[in-house]
Amino acid sequence: MGLLKVILCDIIEAQVVNVGVIGCGHWGPNHIRIFSTLADSRVTWATDLSSERLEFIKTTYPQLSVSADYKDVLKDSRVHAIVIATSAATHYIDI
């Protein structure tokens, strides 16, 4: 609960939720577009394995940080929420 409390306090203090989007194929760009229209959210990261998709996102949304490695989003302490917009089979690790 301690970490959650810190994150919630950061969000309340900032009054803006910083969002990272993992996966920029079909749904990712839609999530970026919608979050970008909301006053209380800001997309800060987009990741995808495809360099072509990342180039499209960077051209369309030059203010975003982009990476082929989703771990870059996880490392950024400014990110409050992450949208996983990859194919369903990649949402978890099969153990």
Image (tube, rainbow, N blue to C red):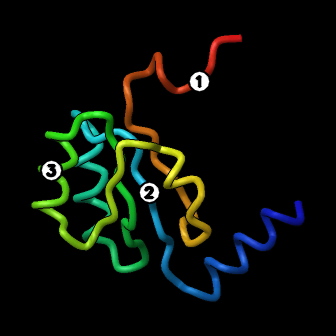
Q: Position of residue 11 (x, y in %)?
A: 61, 77
Q: Amino acid at mark 3?
A: Glu
Q: Residue at x 59, y 58 (%)?
A: 75
**Residue 55: which disc?**
3
The answer to whether residue 25 is above or below residue 68 is above
Say what secondary structure mark 1 lies in: loop
Q: Earlier in the sequence, mark 3 or mark 2?
A: 2
Q: Most extreme residue toward the bottom, as rendered?
A: 13
Quadrant of res 94: top right
Q: Amino acid at mark 2?
A: Gly
Q: Position of residue 61 (x, y in %)?
A: 18, 65
**Residue 92: which disc?**
1
Residue at which label 2 appears: 20
Q: Position of residue 69 (x, y in %)?
A: 43, 43
Q: Dots 3 and 2: beta carbons under 8 Å?
A: no
Question: How far apart are labels 2 and 1 at the CA level?
Answer: 17 Å
Question: How far apart are labels 3 and 2 at the CA level?
Answer: 16 Å
Q: Amino acid at mark 1?
A: Tyr
Q: Residues within 10 Å of mark 1 (few under 14, many from 20)?
A: few
The answer to whether residue 46 is above or below residue 77 is above
